[in-house]
Image: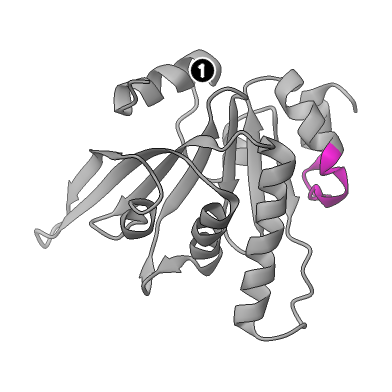
């Protein structure tokens, strides 16, 4: 498969027309849903809590993607702070582009870049990446925004931290099975929005 920034844009235009990858994904696209991590924040240390949160998000991966671990991983970040070091170990390549470049009144340059990774990942490797996202850092640096895109199922998974994840699908048919699997974890505040989009309200 030939994958690059153009391929990503074509995929999004065909399956998620009008969507610009941006957080919060729940409010950028419908049908989508928000699931919340249900780990007791009073149990154990902060490190233990985050490990449990990463493990729970990995369980969601198994529920959502099954054995389909062939993914695009999109990482938007400022300057050179990214997931590049950890993802290069696990994926078959990286394609980078500059999304935006600004110069403030002091002449300081702010660059927003995008790395696109492609790989067939094992569960253990995905857990490493999810733990970095839950930690909101890798090697002490902020990692920016990360999106997992499963091309066959047409699903976008956005773990936005230790709180939970937004899941978007190209259509109702793709999202409904996921909603039924994870219904108990759907954010109560946003359940109505999702059920309306799915036509089950």
Query: At 25% across and 39% down in the image, what residue appears?
Result: 96
| Depicted 151 relative to depicted 141: above or below | above
Q: Quadrant of the C terminus?
A: top right
User: Nearest the camera: 85 or 124?
Assistant: 124
Farthest residue, direction left:
107
| Depicted 71 relative to depicted 78: above or below | above
Query: At 31% across and 42% down in the image, what residue appears?
Result: 114
Question: Percent position (x, y) of residue 195?
Answer: 83, 31
Question: Percent position (x, y) of residue 197?
Answer: 76, 25
Q: Quadrant of the N terminus?
A: top left
Magenta stretch encompasses residue 189? yes
Using residue 169 as the reference point, say whether residue 175 is left or right of it: right
Question: Percent position (x, y) of residue 140?
Answer: 37, 74
Name the quadrant containing residue 84: bottom left
Q: Residue tagged by mark 1?
A: 17
Magenta segment: 181-192
Name the quadrant containing residue 7: top left
> What is the tally of numbered marks visible in this picture?
1
Using residue 144 as the reference point, say whether residue 178 is left or right of it: right
User: Nearest the camera: 12 or 131?
Assistant: 131
Farthest residue, direction bottom:
45
Question: Percent position (x, y) of residue 142?
Answer: 39, 65
- Element class at badge 1: loop
Query: At 73% across and 28% down in the image, what residue appears?
Result: 175
Query: At 80% across and 36% down in the image, what residue appears?
Result: 179
């Amino acid at each position: 498969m030939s994958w690059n920034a153009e391929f990503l844009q074509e995929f999004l235009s065909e399956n998620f027309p009008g969507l610009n990858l941006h957080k919060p994904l729940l409010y950028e696209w419908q049908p989508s849903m928000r699931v919340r991590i249900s780990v007791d924040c009073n149990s154990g240390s902060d490190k233990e809590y985050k490990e449990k949160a990463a493990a729970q998000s990995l369980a969601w991966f198994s529920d959502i993607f099954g054995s389909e671990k062939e993914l695009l991983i999109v990482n938007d970040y400022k300057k050179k702070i990214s997931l590049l070091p950890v993802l290069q170990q696990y994926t078959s390549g990286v394609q980078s582009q500059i999304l935006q470049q600004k110069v403030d009144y002091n002449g300081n340059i702010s660059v927003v870049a995008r790395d696109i990774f492609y790989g067939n990942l094992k569960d253990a490797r995905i857990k490493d990446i999810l733990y970095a996202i839950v930690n909101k850092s890798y090697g002490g640096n902020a990692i920016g925004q990360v999106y997992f895109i499963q091309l066959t199922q047409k699903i976008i998974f956005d773990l936005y931290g230790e709180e939970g994840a937004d899941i978007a699908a190209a259509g109702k048919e793709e999202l409904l099975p996921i909603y039924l699997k994870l219904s108990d974890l759907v954010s109560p505040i946003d359940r109505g929005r999702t059920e309306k989009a799915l036509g089950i309200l």
